[in-house]
Amino acid sequence: MHFGLYIELMIDKLKENYGSIFEAALISEIERVGIIKEVASGTQLMHIGQYIKSMPLVLSGTLKIMREDQEGDSLLLYYLERGETCAMTLSCCLGNQKSEIIAVTESDTILIMIPIEKMESWTAQFKSWRNFVFESYNHRIKDLLETVDSIAFLKMDERLIKYLEEKSRISEDGIIHKTHQEIAYELHTSRVVISRLLKTLEKKGAISIERNKVKLL
DNA sequence: TCATTAACACGGG
DNA sequence: CCCGTGTTAATGA
């Protein structure tokens, strides 16, 4: 593909996703300094302890933001979709802190990376940017609280249902393309439990199960 | 009581 | 055969 045409496409995507919230001057600033990055599904973008040099704007695809312990066990915190950015990145950038989380692409994803030096000047210069950052913060904290509630107060069967609802909302065809093992990994439990719970959900008629597939009814 | 771990059988690709 | 799945038995919180 011709490179100039490719850039044009990305700019279209940028306007499509952010055009309604950012003023034109800010959009062209993003075009000028942003670095477009295409990432294949299943790639780890962020590691614990890594310093963050730029912040991502999601143009297409989905990222999952996860917590990880020393043994490498992990837990899903929330998803990032197109039109969103990562609040953890923002707090890391502002405090020049190491990352507390990991980010993995859930599908093929296109990002625009914004150098963190721009953060401060844009916050002063563009009202829409300021709003975007604040709203992003609010949204992420809301998601995070929901996850905390879910872990603290819900049993695994209810957590699984919530998880399936969230996943099918994000998925294009409404089908969750995951193995029981992968679901277990994200909910931080064992495959036996997921298999058993999915089986009972199927018997209740809430879902249908195929190999590598779960569909909500 | 319910989760985890290990183990095994079944079956589709 | 390999992998995902369904199930069970033993053990522990």
Image (spheres, coloured by chain):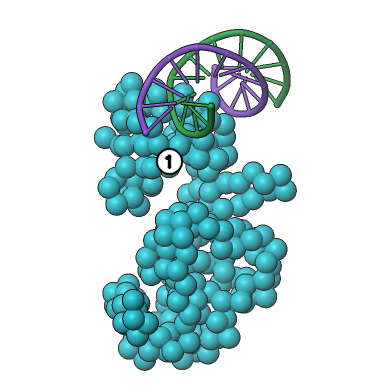
Chain colours: A cyan, B purple, C green
Tell me the residue at 46%/23% (across/down): A196
What residue is rendered at 26% in x and 35% in y? A217
Q: How many marks?
A: 1
Dividing the picture into quadrants, the one containing residue A21 is: bottom left
Write down the chain letter for disc 1: A
Q: Who is closer to the viewer here, A82 or A45?
A: A45
Nearer to me, A115 or A7: A7
Q: Position of residue A10 (x, y in %)?
A: 35, 77
Quarter the N terminus of chain A occupies: bottom left
Q: Secondary structure at mark 1?
A: loop
Residue C2 screen position, x and y as percent:
53, 32
Q: Residue at x 48, y 30 (%)?
A: A194
Viewer can see residue A181: yes
**Residue of label 1:** A178
The part of the image, by quadrant, that contains residue A100 is bottom right
* Picture quadrant where residue A16 is located: bottom left
Q: Is residue A107 above or below residue A10?
A: above
The three-letter code of the residue at mark 1 reads: Lys
- Residue A187 visible in rendering: no
Q: Residue A124: x and y, percent?
A: 50, 89
